Amino acid sequence: MDTFINVLLFGLVAYFLMTKFLPVKGVKQITAIQLKEALIRKDVQFIDVRTPREFASNHIEKFKNVPLHEITSKANQLSKDKELIVICQSGMRSNKATKRLKKLGFDRVSNVKGGIGAWYY
């Protein structure tokens, strides 16, 4: 019985980690180099999900600040007809934001792998 419980707990922990940290199906993962190429396009919306303080200290021009905790309530201000590229400091919060946006019906969503940290290095 103890073995069964241990296996069950291990399975639950593994499932939790996979759903939190693995990329979402249908969300494109792009590099900082690919972001640089995308910045010249007019058919893309750029969203930075860091806090207003983080955004104010440094951000990439063309990105609009929509903090992660506001992404659901402000999603109606975004166009579903344009691709969305989402960034944060390291890629973790933007990955969460892309999951929410996919659930809200946005089809073309991209996450910047490594976030702002990858952009500057």
Image (cartoon, grey):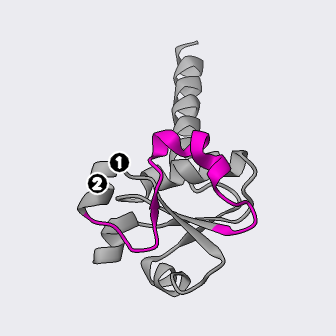
Q: Is residue 76 magenta?
A: yes
Q: Mark 2 and mark 1 in contact (Cβ < 8 Å)?
A: yes
**Mark 1, other Cα within 10 Å: few <14 / some 14–19 / many ≥20:** some
Quadrant, the N terminus: top right
Query: In the figure, 14 relative to 34: above or below?
Result: above
Inspect the image, locate mark 1, and give the three-letter code of the amino acid beneath it.
Thr
The quadrant holding residue 81 is: bottom right
Query: In the figure, 41 relative to 118: above or below?
Result: below
In percent of the image, x 59 and y 54: which residue is there?
Answer: 98
Query: Label 1's element?
Result: loop
Residue 53 point in image, percent of width and height = 27, 50
Q: Residue furthest left?
A: 57
Left or right placement of residue 39 versus residue 98 in this view: left
Residue 75 point in image, percent of width and height = 63, 48
In percent of the image, x 34 and y 50: which residue is there?
Answer: 52
Of residues 1 and 14, which is closer to you in this image? 14
Left or right placement of residue 116 versus residue 21 in this view: left
Inspect the image, locate mark 2, and give the three-letter code of the amino acid beneath it.
Glu
**Mark 2, other Cα within 10 Å: few <14 / some 14–19 / many ≥20:** some
Return the mark for residue 51.
Answer: 1
In percent of the image, x 35 and y 67: which residue is there?
Answer: 116
Residue 112 point in image, percent of width and height = 48, 67
Return the mark for residue 54.
Answer: 2
Q: Is residue 42 magenta?
A: no
Residue 92 point in image, percent of width and height = 44, 52
Query: Label 2's element?
Result: helix
Of residues 57 and 12, which is closer to you in this image? 57
Magenta part of the protein: which range? Answer: 58-83
